[in-house]
Amino acid sequence: MKSVGIIVVFYNLSDYVTSCLTAIAEQSHADFTCYCIDDCSTDDTFAKLTAFSEKDPRFVAIQNERNYGSPCHSRNVGLEKIQPCDYFMILDGDDLLHPEALKVSLAVIESSDTLDCVAFDKVLFSDENHIQPVAIPSPLPVTVYHDGFVRFLDKDAHSPQANVWNKLYRTERYRHERFCEEIFYEDDVLYTLQILANTRDYVFIDLPLYFYRRHPSSVTSSLKHQRYLNDATRRLQYTYDYFFKAPRISQAMAAHLKQQMAEDAYRMLVSKIIRKTKEPELKAMLFPIAQANFTRLITEQMIDLQDLSFIKRIIAKLFLNNHIKSAWLLAKIFG
């Protein structure tokens, strides 16, 4: 029986520990080791993880030596631990798995030696919802793709999702991939890019096998806005370093990626910040950061404005030259 390593990251999730781990413990495929990494919670999350692991030896409770403030370090701790396993999976500590998730995804990935990654659908729920797992049909509704990296860049209806938690991975294929610990926002996007660049075939199972808990939205602080802008820039910097300093992909794919990097930079540092920032104080604080970061990406040749459409180039130039109202009007119309 093939072994699976499951990585689950926790921080102040005391209310959800038992339900999350019970959903894993009740998997119909029983051969797994679940590494529960706590990022120094201030509640009793780690105590509950420890208690659960003492009752079920398939669970291992680990606590970081300090709080890292991002799931990336904890996930990397887990990636070191799962090395002996044939396959691995990543979960968030407040989510749930369908009881057949491991069994179904394992059956699919083992159907071909070139299948490196199995993705499955998700269903959103809240604390007020009751989840009813779907019955597993036969045959399974699966689609195999041979061009996951390109599809991911195209962002079409058949693109792999950026989420790292609704997938089963072949360990041998991705043994050396890690999360960038310097970023908090959109870290999934970066890791998924690395994964798909090293994927031969991936398959999508059109069944909701992952249950994603939706929490009430909270007010975003100015500090979080700043971190988002800086993380967006770091993510593109890391992408550039990973794919272009030592070429890992074909020239055609590299050109496609550079175009998408320009689109991402425009989306995160120009369009979104112009359209979403309302308060004058926030504008005064955030616009110079976004302008400086976008300019640096251009100056250091990580992105090229020529990879953007004509209208997006105009909007970007207006924003960089502080013609904010004109940039806002065009961004509101054209995105």
Image (cartoon, grey):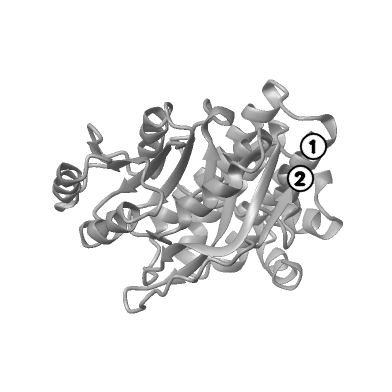
Q: 135 and 94: which one is in front?
A: 135
Query: In the structure shown, which secondary structural element does the residue marked by tag 1 occupy?
Result: helix
Q: Amino acid at mark 2?
A: Val
Q: Quadrant of residue 79?
A: top left
Q: 212 and 292: which one is in front?
A: 212
Compare marks 1 and 2 and give the one earlier in the sequence: 2
Q: Position of residue 248 (x, y in %)?
A: 71, 26
Q: Amino acid at mark 1?
A: Met
Marker count (numbered): 2
**How far apart, in angstroms, are the residues tagged by discs 1 and 2?**
7 Å
Classify residue 240 as left or right of residue 82: right
User: Label 2: few (<14), some or many (≥20) within 10 Å?
Assistant: some
Classify residue 151 as left or right of residue 17: right
Q: Quadrant of residue 94?
A: bottom left
User: Label 1: few (<14), some or many (≥20) within 10 Å?
Assistant: some
Q: Which residue is mark 1?
A: 253
Tell me, yes or no, if residue 289 can be seen here.
no
Tell me, yes or no, if residue 104 can be seen here.
yes
Q: Position of residue 127 (x, y in %)?
A: 32, 73
Task: Name the quadrant of the C terminus.
Answer: bottom right
Q: 321 and 273: which one is in front?
A: 273
Query: In the structure shown, which secondary structural element does the residue marked by tag 2 occupy?
Result: helix
Report the residue at 78% width, 34% height from top.
254
Task: Name the quadrant of the N terminus.
Answer: top left
Q: Are marks 1 and 2 in contact (CB under 8 Å)?
A: yes
The image shows residue 335, relative to residue 6, as above or below, that is: below
Classify residue 165 as left or right of residue 215: right
Q: Which residue is mark 2?
A: 150
Report the residue at 30% width, 52% height from top.
25
Label of residue 302 in the image: none
Q: Position of residue 72 (x, y in %)?
A: 41, 40
Q: Position of residue 147 (x, y in %)?
A: 76, 44
